[in-house]
Image (cartoon, grey):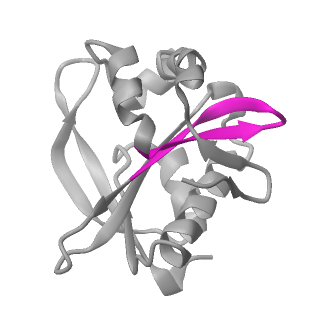
Amino acid sequence: MSILRGARVTLRPAMADDVDALLAIRTTPEVRRWWGDEEDYRASIVEELPQTYAIVVDGEIAGAIQWYEEGDPQYRHAGMDIYLHADRAGQGLGTDAVRTLARHLIDERGHHRLVIDPAADNAAAIRAYEKVGFRPVGVMRRYERGQDGTFHDGLLMDLLADELT
């Protein structure tokens, strides 16, 4: 993976040395609210490293953005997920990171369609993704288990290559 530069963020491949910083962000209440509880956060982060970019702002890790690809030619697309430290929320950094990764997945990896699936009630994330060009496709009912142990709805959003803003 190469280093990607956005208007305000730098996305660089996450490394083992980043695990402690990512763990600190991922376990904050503000991030756990949307990402849920995991049995072993550290192991999960280490497992995800090959498909994860650290979001760097002013020389510091502000969060992470992950991606995956569906390789079946009949259904080929890519997806992504992101988390930011609460202190960095509301500054347009998430939008910049999503736009930067989307551009890379479209221009460099040749994807015509991207997906993202925020919690249906995560209004801030949905607004950020819409600024990049993602559109709601539909609600996935009882999609993910929340911290309270019950299942919550997710919103499937997608972006076609020519809709990237």
Q: Would you say residue 69 sits in the magenta stretch? A: no
**Which residue appears farthest toward the bottom when viewing the image?**
162
Q: Is residue 42 left or right of residue 89?
A: left
From the top left corner, tell me how far across and down residue 88 is, in percent: 70, 33
Residue at 48% across, 47% down? 123
Residue 165 sits in quarter: bottom right
Q: Is residue 78 left or right of residue 152?
A: right
Above or below residue 75? Residue 36 is above
Q: Give the total of numbered labels.
A: 0
Q: Is residue 128 left or right of residue 152?
A: right
**Which residue appears farthest toward the right when viewing the image?**
58
Nearest the viewer among 54 and 158 is: 54
Nearest the viewer among 101 and 165 is: 101
Q: Would you say residue 64 sits in the magenta stretch? A: yes
Residue 56 sits in quarter: top right
From the top left corner, tell me how far across and down residue 146 is, in percent: 26, 26
Above or below residue 25? Residue 76 is below
Residue at 16% across, 80% down? 74
Q: Which residues are magenta?
A: 51-67
Residue at 16% across, 25% down? 150
Decide whether the magenta segment is chiefly helix, strand or loop. Answer: strand
From the top left corner, tell me how far across and down residue 85 is, in percent: 62, 27
Residue at 48% across, 22% down? 26
Above or below residue 12? Residue 83 is above
Q: Is residue 45 left or right of residue 91?
A: left
From the top left corner, tell me how far across and down residue 95 is, in percent: 63, 55
